[in-house]
Amino acid sequence: MADFVLKVNGTELHVSAPADESLLFVLRDRLNLTGTKYGCGEGQCGACTVLLDGKPARSCITPASGAAGTNITTIEGLEQNGQVSPVQQAFLEEGAFQCGYCTSGMVLSATALLRKTPHPTDEQIVAHMDGNICRCGTYPRIIDAVKRASQSPAKAGGQ
Amino acid sequence: MKVRDALLDELAQHTIDDKPYWFRLDRRDFLKLFGGGLLVCLADVSTWAQESGRNFGGHELPKDIASWLHIAADGRVTVFTGKVEVGQNIRTSLAQQVAEELRVPFDTITMVMGDTDLVPWDAGTFGSRTTPTMGPQLRTMAAAARDMLIETAAARWKVDPATLTAADAKVTNPRNGHSLTYGELTRGEKLMKTVSGEVALTPASDWKVAGTAVPKVNGRDFVTGKHKYPSDIVRPGMMFGKVLRPAGFNATLVSVDTSGAEKISGAKVVQDGNFIAVAAADASTAKSALSALRATWNVPAQPSNKELFALLKQPPATQQEDRGPEHVSGSVPQAMASAPIQLHQQYTVQYIAHAPLEPRAAVAEWVNGKLTVWTGTQRPFGVRDELMAAFHIPVEQVRVIQPDMGSGYGGKHTGEAAVEAARLAKATGKPVKVVWTREEEFTWAYFRPAGLIEISSGAQHDGTLVAWEHHNYNSGPAAITTPYNVANQLIQFHPANSPLRQGSYRSLAATANHFARESHMDEVAHAVGMDPLEFRMKNLSDPRLRAVFQAAAEKFGWSGSKSTSQRGFGIAGGTDKGGYVATCVEVEINPDKKIKIRRVVQAWESGAIVNPDGLRNQVGGAIVQAIGGALFESIQFANGRILNPHFAQYRVPRFSDTPQIEIVLIDRKDLPSAGAGESGIVGLAPAVGNAIYAATGTRLRNMPMALPSAASGETVSMFRS
């Protein structure tokens, strides 16, 4: 077991876990942040996406101890003062989900994209998001949601 | 096929036995639970009593109660149904229909779904049956409740009920402007009414809440991560379980050494026959203990994809019920003998995996001998039956709760994880969570059946079809009959011994049967030298199917579409489960022969639209999911093992596979609403195959489809013949 501190959604949290335990399972099972989802355990589906210092990472293949010292953002950390982020709002307005299980990862991947590229083209959205699977097949709506968020006056980059 | 037969077919695809139980909940206790208000129960109404039948998979639908609805003193409305929300949006669309008939604001309604202690027995959520059956049931109850509230107000005011109106959760007397809210009318009452007669329902043309694009209920919880899926459930003191999987299908355990696992601090090993599993306070320890188990298995030699279709063509070793032909008319041999144009072709579909993004998951807890399991399933009552059988406990001692889950597509009818978690919970005395890995889900769930389909057809030179013979081996009888006019037909489904565990999949065999039929129709069209759409229309009189073909073709610009060697246009369509679909596609053939779907136009009609946004979402999702089966999804197996049980090896559609999609919805307010979660999947694959032929002259008859000379690449199927 290793003891380390993770800074999750702006709060420092003490964790005691095997050094190689994935960030995904530390978040879900030890910190009760279940918004981050298990989909494949090998970085192929994107359901477990979180942001490390603003960059998207697959938490299922990221050892939690290795994430110490970074700013970790999970889906639970996007709301500010009870307001959903522009990306979350855009997903709601476009109805860009069915079962919603991929949505956390989609929202975080999209958030990272819009920070880097505030006005992405369709091609840029597809290239950036292609590692995220929506088995329900709502991709066109997700693309529309990302575009909608990119036009939001509140700007997605500010979360 | 009769509706009841279709339901039985679907249930027959389950690998589990269905036990003949249903729980008759004491309604008086139930009302006590609410402390008052108005409780309306739906009693036997002939239309669905007939559908449920007496031999419904061993169950008899509860004759006295199919669903219920409660109006509390504060005006809150609670609706109880055994249907479950898996992403198809019925939590929203059913509530819309209740709001419509009850005349209450949409947001006053709470749907309680899939909790076996709270809701009436239900066979499960499958077969596109929620909208055509549960929808009218809930509407009937709501309309009856509204009438009762009007009668209650009329009695208080001593006026004729016919003079009163109900709107916005109030009964109003238009003559003097007096009104009472539903809450005021039910306050202090303990009213329980059973609805047994037919109640006049609001026609779709008058709908104000139903028929509109109400957003998903609790959508906010899904974008903020707050919604608790089955795999997110946490119970106090909960442990994490892992199950040792055999080295292959049909394996027998030779020996197991658990000593290594038992030495791991905090790990508990449970062995009960062939069930070997571990539980620990955290998932990492459980995983370590699992990998410390040393087991030897004897795995018998078993078939692979190579001999699959020859195997399916063999008569089953165990005699299955011979259901005979689905349809026979005229004489196919006679008609074929004189038909100037004759075609005989074979089509195949592979086993594919549902791969719901949330794998099987369950949390089980025993308290004073009562088992409660939270799990992801399309059949909470089916899972309850499995648990009763596995643990030899009566119905009162099992409760299954189904939180809205990470989808199913027909793949979560069974309760494996529930039984596993419950066994471990029993052994440890603690709540236990079992979440299958992706590899487990790809291996130990069940698959969409593979199938071999043979079609022979005869036509006149003018394009009139005269003979049609269609044999489906193993994949299933759904949508096997042709919607086209053919005087001489022989259509038959042949069960086979499947080498892999198989079961329901979105639309069942309608995908395979449409792929074969609509590919073959295209072949006949080319053989007689007619435009594929014109040929279909010449042989088609069903006005609803004609309408979707016309709508899709018009939106697509079919008449002006001329295929080239790099760009092909194809069309296909059909009907199943009350839905009508026509699909036009444009494919691009790359220089290396890879296939890229550029554009899809799909027209859809399923009667009166309950929620146009939800419907559009379902139809669009079905198109995207169809791309996988059409172009790259295929389970590869040999000797009892799945060879591609990971997303890195089993390719599902992604953003980059998604074409431009345009959906045309036809709203037939004059027709009953049919389910729309499934049949939107059936048109794409044949339309793509037909477009590939139009561009290349190569006919692809095996799903997933790939051009023979394609360089090795992701879209290449290993299984083309």
Image (spheres, coloured by chain):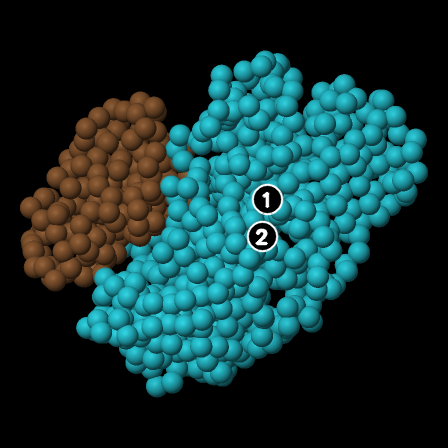
Q: Chain of mark 2?
A: B
Colour in which the image shows chain A: brown
From what the image shows, is residue B633 above or below residue B51? above
Q: Position of residue B399 (x, y in %)?
A: 43, 75
Colour in which the image shows chain B: cyan
Q: Are marks 1 and 2 in contact (CB under 8 Å)?
A: yes
Front-most of residues B44 and A54 = A54
Q: Chain of mark 1?
A: B
* Secondary structure of the residue carrying numbered label 2: loop
> Alpha-carbon neighbours of circle 1 within 10 Å: few (<14), some, or many (≥20)?
few
Label at residue B306: 1
Q: Position of residue B405 (x, y in %)?
A: 40, 56
- The amino acid at mark 2 is Pro
User: Which quarter shows the C terminus of chain B?
Assistant: top right
Q: Which residue is mark 2?
A: B303
Q: CA distance from mark 1 to mark 2?
A: 8 Å
- The amino acid at mark 1 is Lys
Q: Residue at 65% of width from left, 20% of height from top?
A: B697
- In the visual, does B184 lie left or right of A52? right
Residue A50 visible in rendering: yes
Q: Residue at 10% of width from left, 44% of height from top?
A: A71
Q: Residue at 39% of width from left, 47% of height from top?
A: B646
Q: Position of residue B215 (x, y in %)?
A: 40, 45
- In the visual, does B673 lie left or right of A108? right
